[in-house]
Amino acid sequence: MARSPRAVPDPLTRREQEVASLLGQGLSNRRIASELDLSEHTVHHHVSSILKKLNLSSRQQVASRLRDR
């Protein structure tokens, strides 16, 4: 009996996905914080985590990655 392939889990948490989506729309940390009712510091932390997890170095690369999905 053949095993079905397992889906590769998304490396981003639900909140990081929300931040990445807004980041992909070109929003600033301040606007993202306002939209998600978070502090700018928390958004900065999420952006840093997103960049690290996806092995990217810029916000523009995040936007590009989201478009390519």
Image (spheres, rainbow, N blue to C red):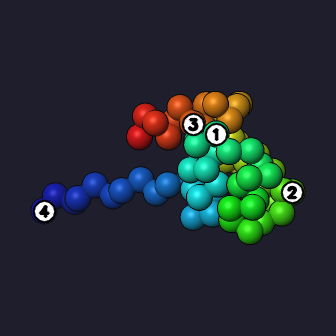
Q: Earlier in the sequence, mark 1 or mark 2?
A: 1
Q: Residue furthest left?
A: 1
The residue positioned 83% from the left and 63% from the top of the image is 39
- Reading the image, the residue beneath label 4 is 1
How far is mark 3 from mark 2, CA to CA?
21 Å
Q: Which mark is residue 26?
A: 1
Q: Earlier in the sequence, mark 4 or mark 3?
A: 4
- Reading the image, the residue beneath label 2 is 41
Q: Earlier in the sequence, mark 1 or mark 4?
A: 4
Could you tell me the amino acid type at mark 2? His
How far is mark 3 from mark 1, CA to CA?
8 Å
Could you tell me the amino acid type at mark 4? Met
The residue positioned 68% from the left and 65% from the top of the image is 36
- Reading the image, the residue beneath label 3 is 63
Q: Earlier in the sequence, mark 3 or mark 1?
A: 1
The residue positioned 86% from the left and 57% from the top of the image is 41
